[in-house]
Amino acid sequence: MFVPCQAWSMPAPRSYTREDVVEFHLPGCPPLVRRMVDRLISAGARPAEPGEFTRRAFVNGRLDLIQAEAVLAVIRASSDEEMRTAGLLLEGTFSRRLHEMEDRLLSLCADLEASIDFVDQDIDLLPTGEALRRVSDLRAESARLLAESRVMEFGWDAPTAFLVGPPNAGKSTLFNALVGGRSLTSDIPGTTRDLLEGRLGALKIVDAPGLFDRRAPTDLDRIAAQRAERAARQADLWIVVVDALAPERVAAAAAWTRSSVPVVTKADLVGWDEARRIASRLPLADPEIVSGTTGEGVDALRRRLAEWGKGGSAGSEARFALPRRQRALLREAVRSLDAAAGALRADRGVELAALDARAAMQALGALSGRQVDEDLLTRLFERFCIGK
């Protein structure tokens, strides 16, 4: 059977994916299309995975992650306004401002961390006043971007927060305090084996077996921990639980780059002054301090999580409409730069300012895609239709 068809060649890098591409154009007749696809597959081709072309475009530098998610927003837009706001992100105005901020922040982080090597010597590589000015400028620019944005409300963008931490760190007690759940609690590690879900406003909270423990006593415990880790890697937000009685066990969680809210638990057992000292030494920015047993500090954490779930309160007149994940990361960058500026003003040491600036860099990197893990990319692109 003769099928009228045209083949268009698009050599790299002038294609959507910056790769050599051939497009076949034929009449929009389903039987003809199926016949053409069957012939191509029989010749050795394979169907594209969901979002594969956009993922290739991202990997090859054709799009950043903001623009890649904007492609999905264009596909799923159901109104002219949704199409307009998604198109604005795809056009790159937001991305250009973000990349300029990232470059400036990277230079600042390098200067701050270089000055740490000379902190005990009479060499002032980066005067405190100059560092504060640069941090304040970056904070102001990130706050402007935040003020110009609002949450892009789609049903598929509903956020999930995952309680992450080692066994017996107090996750289930905190889960119960946050959502009024009835998760079984015990001093015996491994009490929680199933994934338990609760709601906090628009945010879904998930409790799970302790992560990062490769010494689980039974096969069942190991299977439960592996299942929990797979689910955790798909979450939008991590609530990183740090046991005040064993704070060193947070190291594995801190090494993973993603949007997170650190929480020091069991403050009632070590005393609040000691809990604050532990929080100040964590490799995670702006930790909350709570006692899941007494409830102290839980309301502040609940408000912070609810704020994250809403994505902020910018009005409908905002210029940019961002997916909830993106806007939360931008808020995280503002929060970290605030902390860096506070450390410099209070003369608490360049080390703390450098740590907070690095946290802001990680948040912006997760926003643009410069620092993002493979599991998050898989989750994002799985939302696309087949192919595009």
Image (tube, rainbow, N blue to C red):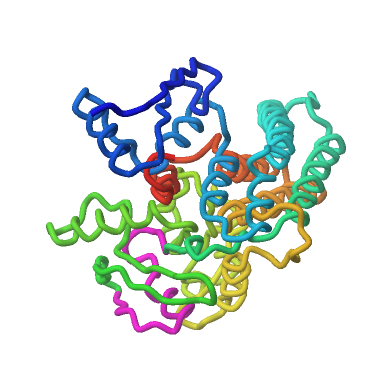
Q: Which sits in the foreground, 28 or 83?
A: 28
Q: Which residues are magenta?
A: 163-186
Is the residue 273 above or below the residue 236 in the image?
below
Image location (x, y in percent) of residue 96: 71, 35
Q: Position of residue 262 (x, y in %)?
A: 53, 59
Q: Quadrant of the C terminus?
A: top left
Q: How many marks?
A: 0
| Residue 271 is one of the magenta-drawn residues | no
Frontmost residue, 286 versus 143:
143
Q: Is residue 365 above or below residue 167?
A: above
Q: Which residue: 67% across, 49% down?
A: 333
Residue 113: image location, x then y, percent = 66, 31
- For the N terminus, the image quarter is top left
Q: Where 71 falls versus 183 (above or below)?
A: above
In front here: 195 or 249?
195
Res 225 → quadrant: bottom left
164 in magenta: yes
Looking at this view, name the residue that lies furthest to the left. 219
Check the image and name the residue furthest to the top: 11
Residue 148 placement, left or right of 227: right
Q: In this view of the protein, which residue sits in the foreground, 203 or 148?
A: 148
Q: Residue at x 46, y 80 (%)?
A: 179
Which residue: 27% across, 70% down? 192
Q: Residue at x 12, y 57 (%)?
A: 219
Q: Is residue 356 left or right of residue 289?
A: right
